Image (cartoon, grey):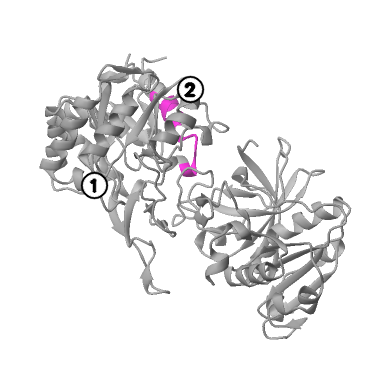
Amino acid sequence: MSKRIEDLTVTENHRLAEGFFVVKVSSSAGLPEILPGQFVQVLVTESPSTFLRRPISVHDVDYLSNTISLLIQVAGAGTERLSRLRHGETINLIYPLGNAFTLPAVGEKVLLAGGGCGMAPLLFLGRKIKESGIEPQFALGFRNRSRILEHEQFRDLGTVHLATEDGSEGHSGFITDIPAFRESKWDRVYCCGPEPMMKAVAALCLERDIFCEVSLENLMACGMGICLCCIVPTTSGNLCSCTDGPVFNIRDLKWQTSE
Amino acid sequence: MADLRIKIGSLELRNPVMLASGTCGYGAELEDLIDLSKLGAIVVKGTTLEPREGNPYPRMAETASGMLNAVGLQNKGIGYFEKHIYPTLAEYDTHVIVNVNGNTVEDYIELSRRIDRLASIPAIELNISCPNVKQGGMIFGTNPTSAREVIAAVRKAYSRTLIVKLSPNVTDITEFARISEEEGAEAVSLVNTLLGMAVDPKTMKPVLSTVTGGLSGPAIKPVALRMVWQTARAVKIPVIGLGGIMNGDDALEFIMAGATAVQIGTATFIEPRTALSAIVNMDSFLSERNYDSIINIIGIINRI
């Protein structure tokens, strides 16, 4: 699948919660096919301390308006600059990059589990799954009520189960504590979130022999499989999370058994 | 159109701009974004006899105007290269140069011999400057006796154009350039990365799994430029300059300081079109100043 380098125009930037923003960018050339799980490499301008591009996963795609949504969590100077993008500004992207989630087969029961910024690829994945005739369910985890991100769009696609670590909203604890997660018989679980969350989900899925894919967020320089900096140890050796991933089946990852 | 052609030994390049090893994969990774046939050459990934997994994650740290890497020559080995990668490279309409690495002199000899048999590879870049491996690499490139030994041995084993990639982590880089020239290298390329490190105060640990790594990017450009200038005055063979070139003017600086050719490295990660824009910039600069050829401005700072 071919990638391109292109200047896109910012059409919207709205704040979801403290430190979280959704930036929409539109392509005048028309978007290429983008698959759920893929990401873009954003060139950050006007931020002297930011040297490299920032990998951001595709949150949603709207082919009618040729618009990509990016969910941005402010983590440093680069993402702070991206959170201040204004309507009409152009940003340069290299995209689409990376592999994709494997879509479920007809009739399968699927759970999309994530937390914080890891929710990003699950919206677009949920939309694709819904389009294929399956109603996905979501398990979303947050630290507390004030950290909950807007998830109306997720509710439009399927049932949303919420968990907060302090119990201030939804189930108390981690997403793996949600009764629906533990009690239902899932055919597939897709997960993206902080590493401890993904490891807990992976452990549960392995124990129950559930197909599970996770999307990793390793530190990257190029995003194109050139620099070999974002490697992840797998059963087939060190692979690039940018080109061989970011989506991996948990059975191929070496971390599943170590913790 | 100004004449951008230059020669590295017997090898003629259509222009002086190459992609540096380790920053362009095997070319294919960039084909969607840039036309490789516009480039003088590409120097593909550091290759070793045996497959290597490289160093553990994390291998990269972003720094002020640069980055540290500690990849450690991850590659699939020469056997895989010959069978699966070489056939695709042979199709490219640009010179493909292979960066060669080893733990021992014998490794370098064996690898050079095998690459000598690959008709579409006109040159090797002998890497005696990788800072991220426990054996070989920079150990050869920072000791004059070992440098001489490995260069002489590879010269005997390899019949085509031999470029030696030098380490900046030495007191006097011109000493190593002179050794390369004396032992029959057709060119030297410099600089490889500068040894550096980063600490994360939050975790109170080094950022890289290997503690130290190689610094690249515009942070090292003034150092690289100075070394290129010194080296170009010390040897007669062509100097290929690299180290933090981010745009066309940076590339011109290296040429004017004495480099016959340049390599674009880390800049490709951020703007893959940097090498192409450097070529366009060279052409328009020469035309504006009424120079016929790029040769006219090589080392020009020493003349005016």
Secondary element at tag 2 = loop
B237 sits to left or right of A67: left
Same chain shared by disc 1 and disc 2: yes
Residue A27 percent coordinates (x, y): 70, 41
Q: Is residue A193 above or below residue A165?
A: above
Residue B104 percent coordinates (x, y): 23, 43
Look at mark 2 in the image and give the residue it sits on. B92
- Within 10 Å of the Cα at label 2, are there few (<14), some (14-19), or many (20+) other Cα atoms? some
Q: Nearer the viewer, residue B291 or B70?
A: B70
Give the numbered dot on residue B138.
1
- Which residue is found at the position 84% from the left and 66% from the top? A155
Residue numbers of the magenta segment: B269-282
Q: Nearer the viewer, residue A17 or B15?
A: B15
From mark 1 to mark 2, how far is it between C-alphas? 31 Å
Main SS, magenta residues: helix
User: Label 2 sits on what residue type?
Assistant: Tyr
User: Is A147 a magenta residue?
Assistant: no
User: Label 1 sits on what residue type?
Assistant: Met
Please give the chain letter of the residue carrying mark 2.
Answer: B
- Which residue is found at the position 16% from the left and 25% from the top? B184
The quarter of the picture where the C terminus of chain A appears is bottom right
Query: Going from the N terminus, do you reach mark 1 or mark 2 first?
Result: 2
B108 sits to left or right of A39: left
Q: Quadrant of residue A207?
A: bottom right
